[in-house]
Image (cartoon, rainbow, N blue to C red):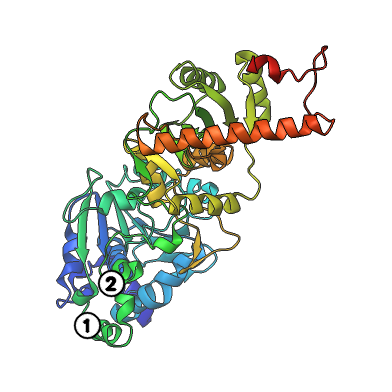
Amino acid sequence: MNDYSALKYLLKHKEFDTNELFDPRFPEQKIFCDDPAKHKALHCTRRAAKSYTAGLYMVETCLKYPDSNCLFIGLTRQSALDIIDKDILQVINRKHSLGMELNKASLTYTFPNGSIIRVGGVDTSEDEMNKLFGKKYKLVCVDEGSLYTVNMRHLIYDVLGPAMADEEGTICFFGTSSNMTQGLFFDITFALGKTMEAGWSVHRWSAHQNPFINWQKQLDEIAKNRPLYMETPQFRQWYLNEWVIETDKLVYKFHPDKNLFRDLPYPQSKGWSYVLSCDLGWEDDTAIVLSAYHENDPCFYVLKTFAQKHMTFDMVERKLLEFLSDKRYPCNSVIIDGANKQGVETMTMRSNILFEYADKLGKSDHIEIMNGDLIQGKVKIHQDEHDLIDEMMALVWQTAGDKIKYPRKEHPSLPNHRCDALLYGWFNGWHFLSTPAKKATIPGTVEYIKEQEDLHKEAIMERIKREQALKEGGHNGWIKDASGQDPWHRWED
């Protein structure tokens, strides 16, 4: 028996002391792996050895449980392999002489005891996610938890949840704070020391706990050479592990100080026009927004919003009619997403709602124009419409690394349906044609007396012009009656 065969035999028939995998200078890793919770999250700064911890955890599980299956998930298969292979699993394999073998075609690492680590990616399409159906796992590690565009709730609870049942397995989320302030990883890790998502055990540490790098040296260099960088959201995300958004990547330039209102101006005025706008969806929300603008006000006001998934056309029609039946807000137009024109035309025939199709060409340009109104405070959202406000404050452009991708598109994993419905309504509003209302003067005041004098002067000048025109033999546009007299004489009599 050669040395390699002897090692394989030893590993298969004799339990490896997995405590040797962990460095005693980094106890946080062992504490995380020993946590008995079946749903765990590791929320750390950059360079805190999150992915290395995932590698240690999978190796430990494979050694402890012969013939078990572990799964490492990244954004794509290639990115997952790049993370976990050369600098993690190969390093652990050589350091402890574990005898793992990599099959590059199937992206699987096989242990002498029959255990397997698989590498996969799920962010390219739903199909990649669905390939995980029907398999069973002892441990699943999902890396880059805050960056996915697919529905992670569906992945974790619907796809992977049943796959853990046979082995009573564990699902782990690993990640750093990012611009994605919505989604499952955010819900699990947001708030200091607490979780918004029930049933998860959250662990946190920073790169200061990683004994293999000098994190403080890097921070000192940034403070010395790039002090302004320390004020950026990216620094707070990567180095302080805070959930903040880089404002330059926000799609909508909403600001609570400029873009909220409580009560409409001009109460009971007859100058209001109302717009109902709708963005259709099925797996995504169908969103409806009721807005208003006034002939004497340059602002566009959002009064009400509604959103719901899995609405049939019958349900959409009933909800729209419910909005339209409110006599307080007689709508001048109903704007709708025309992606499913057949369905919209069917609703038109049944309900007699006269839909206008939303102009969806040049969407990013429309957004930029609307941002001009937002910055100037000319778009106002009712302070109770928290869902729309949250959506606007979280929606960011899709990025490649740290840069916005062009042509610009909203990040596909973040909801934008209320925002889209608002954009349709705003684009079809006429608030920009408003004129200031003329204020009535109070009798007896200096302003009132001057106004009356000006009106009197205008009347005198008009009469002089008219009489001059008659003397010159023309009527300058005035039409004489049958007697040959200017009809204004009758009014004067």
Q: For this view, does 123 lie left or right of residue 19?
A: right
321 to the left or right of 266: right
> Label 2 neighbourhood size at 10 Å, few (<14), some (14-19), many (20+)?
many
Q: In which quarter of the image is residue 307?
A: top left
- Can you identify the residue that label 2 sits on? 239
Give the residue displayed 45% in from the left and 46% down from the top. 378
> What separation in Å lies between label 2 and label 1 (alpha carbons)?
11 Å
The quadrant in which the C terminus is found is top right
* Left/right of residue 150 with respect to residue 105 in the rendered view: left
Q: Which residue lies furthest to the top in this view?
A: 482
- Give the image quarter of residue 381: top left
What residue type is disc 1 on? Gln
Q: Which of 189 and 432 is in front in this view?
A: 432
Across and down, in percent, residue 387 comes to 36, 39
**Three-letter amino acid code at the position of disc 2:** Tyr
Q: Which mark sits nearer the N-terminus, 2 or 1?
A: 1
Question: Tag on residue 216?
Answer: 1
Q: Is residue 179 above or below residue 112?
A: above
**Residue at 20% of width from left, 63% of height from top?**
204
Q: Which residue is drawn at 82% across and 12% down?
A: 483
**Left or right of 236, for residue 472:** right
Q: Residue placed at 19% from the left, 75% from the top?
A: 209
Q: Which residue of the protein is positioned furthest toward the front in this rendering?
A: 471
